[in-house]
Each structure stands twice: as structure tokens, then as C-alpha cells.
Amino acid sequence: MDLLKKDKKERYDKLFKNWDACLKKNKASNLEALYKKLHSEIRKNPKKTKTERKNKPVRKVIGKDKYAVVREDSKGRKYVRHVKMGKEQKKKRVVAKI
């Protein structure tokens, strides 16, 4: 990381931009100092604080099939959830295919 910073400044900035911002924010000189600082803070107060969400995720059912459900999340991404079949449904499906 240090060699890249000395040799190719543009490449370093592209790859480690977020790390540099984090180091400046926490006032640490390097990654080792950052880790030591963060771990000492965790040891002081190890209890996890729960963050509250702004919006609850919304999942809409777009389409239903015999064996699957197509859903859409709040970001507009679509995905398929397959419905688990029971033993009798599996037997009927096998008989229908034969």
C-alpha cells in the first residue's frame, strides 16, 4: 500500500480512497493504528447498539405460479421464491410426468 502511494498516486487514490477517508475521520496515521484504536473502543463498550431503519423493506408479490412466487423489493429488484412442495404434490407431479 505504501509502495503504491509513492509510485502511482492516481492508482492509489482510486483503490484506497475510502480507506484514506476513514483514516482521516478517525485521526489515525496508518491501518494498524486504526485497528488498535477501534478495538480499544470496542473493549470499552462491547455492547452492540441497534440502529433503527428509516424505512421498513417492502416486498410486493408480482406473480404467482404453482411452484413459485415472483416478488419485487423496495429497490425494484425482482426475484423468484420457490414454494416447497409436500409429499403428495411430489408424487402427483412424478405421475403426471410419466
Image (cartoon, rainbow, N blue to C red):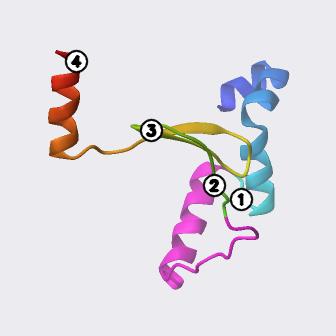
Q: How far is disc 2 from disc 1 in space, using C-alphas?
A: 42 Å
- Mark nearer the N terminus (3 vs 4): 3
Q: Are marks 3 and 1 in contact (CB under 8 Å)?
A: no
Residue 32 x/y as whole percent: 57, 53
The residue that appears at 85% across and 23% down in the rendered structure is 10
State the mark number for residue 59.
Answer: 2
Circle 3 crowding by C-alpha within 10 Å: few under 14, some 14–19, many from 20 = few
Name the residue that disc number 4 marks. 97
Span colored in magenta:
30-56
Which one is in front, 36 or 70? 70
Asked if residue 19 lies in the magenta stretch, the reply is no
Q: Are marks 1 and 4 in contact (CB under 8 Å)?
A: no
**In the rendered image, the vertical position of residue 68 relative to residue 15, given as above or below:** below
Q: Are marks 3 and 4 in contact (CB under 8 Å)?
A: no
Q: Are marks 2 and 4 in contact (CB under 8 Å)?
A: no
Mark 4 secondary-structure assignment: helix
Quarter of the rendering containing residue 92? top left
Name the residue that disc number 3 marks. 68
